[in-house]
Amino acid sequence: MRELGAAVTSGREKAYAYLKDTVLTDPGMQGAFLSEQELADRIGVSRTPIREALLQLAAEDLVELVPKRGARVSPLTGREIRELMELRGIVERYAAQELVSGGGAPVAELRSLLERQRELTGADQAREFIAVDHCFHAALVSAVGNALLDRHYEGLRSRQVRTGVVALFNQQGRQEAVLEEHEAILDALEAGDAQAACAAIDHHLESTLKVLLAG
């Protein structure tokens, strides 16, 4: 019985990860209804783990369960996008201030991630570009060493990746702008200038917000 339970748990986790990292981050899936059977076939699990994963995602307000229709990917509204950027700003500015005051900014790690992003500038690499984008910001937050803050920030990942991909498609040249904005954040951290780092973070998030709302 324990082995069967482990298999169900593994299936649910596999379905949850696939839905959150692949389906929900696809801009084309916003507002779309999901086929449990199609997802089960694609992932290689039964429909039960799919249902369990969808219930978990519904609890996180990432999908909505519509009676007699099934699960629908919750589209990001303008209000939710604003709130996401506001919350990210609060967390990331705090992280920058803490790291500069403590002298522990992960400059080498951030530089490495930025260089990885520079290699992913094609339109077909947009999702991978934004996945590394998330890693860049998450590395900043993680360096503070607050596990609860890490989990809280990680909970924003699917929304962050989805909005990031949408922004890239909404504005030509956005990838290059992101690289410049990340460079400004990194330069300020390397210089130990908390005020400049916070200003660079604000500029980066405000620029993304404008692109998203304009699109």
Image (tube, helix red, strand yellow):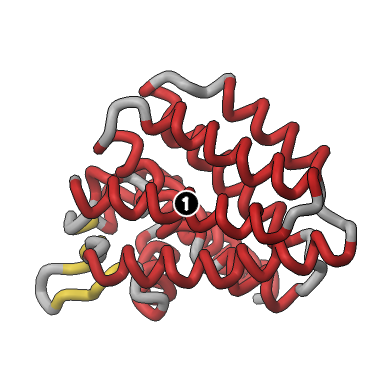
For the point 44% across and 49% down, which residue is it?
161
Q: Position of residue 66 (x, y in %)?
A: 16, 75
Q: Residue 27 falls in which quadrant of the image?
A: top left
Q: Circle 1 is placed at which residue position?
A: 203
Name the amino acid type tagged 1. Answer: His
Name the residue: 38% across, 22% down. 124
Where is residue 133, by image quadrant? top right
Q: Residue furthest right?
A: 103
Residue 19 rendering spot, x and y as whole percentages: 41, 55
Residue 45, can we see it?
Answer: no
Name the image quarter holding residue 171. Answer: top left
Q: Quadrant of the C terminus?
A: top left
Q: Residue at x 54, y 33 (%)?
A: 180
Question: Can residue 109 be seen here?
Answer: yes
Q: Is residue 71 left or right of residue 151?
A: left
Within-10-Å neighbours for mark 1: few <14, some 14–19, many 20+: some
Left or right: 176 as drawn, with respect to 170: right
Q: Is residue 212 above or below residue 114?
A: below
Extreme left residue here? 68
Local SS, label 1: helix
Residue situated in front as seen by the camera: 168 or 128? 168
Q: Position of residue 24 (x, y in %)?
A: 36, 54
Quarter of the rendering occupied by the N terminus = bottom right
| 202 or 52, nearer to the observer | 202
Residue in front for this viewpoint, 153 or 185: 185
Residue at 65% over, 54% down: 197
Q: Please tell me which residue lies in front, 48 or 79.
A: 79
- Residue 106 higher or lower than 148, as above or below: above
Q: Is residue 124 above or below residue 49?
A: above
Instruction: List x then y, in percent, for residue 157.
Output: 51, 58
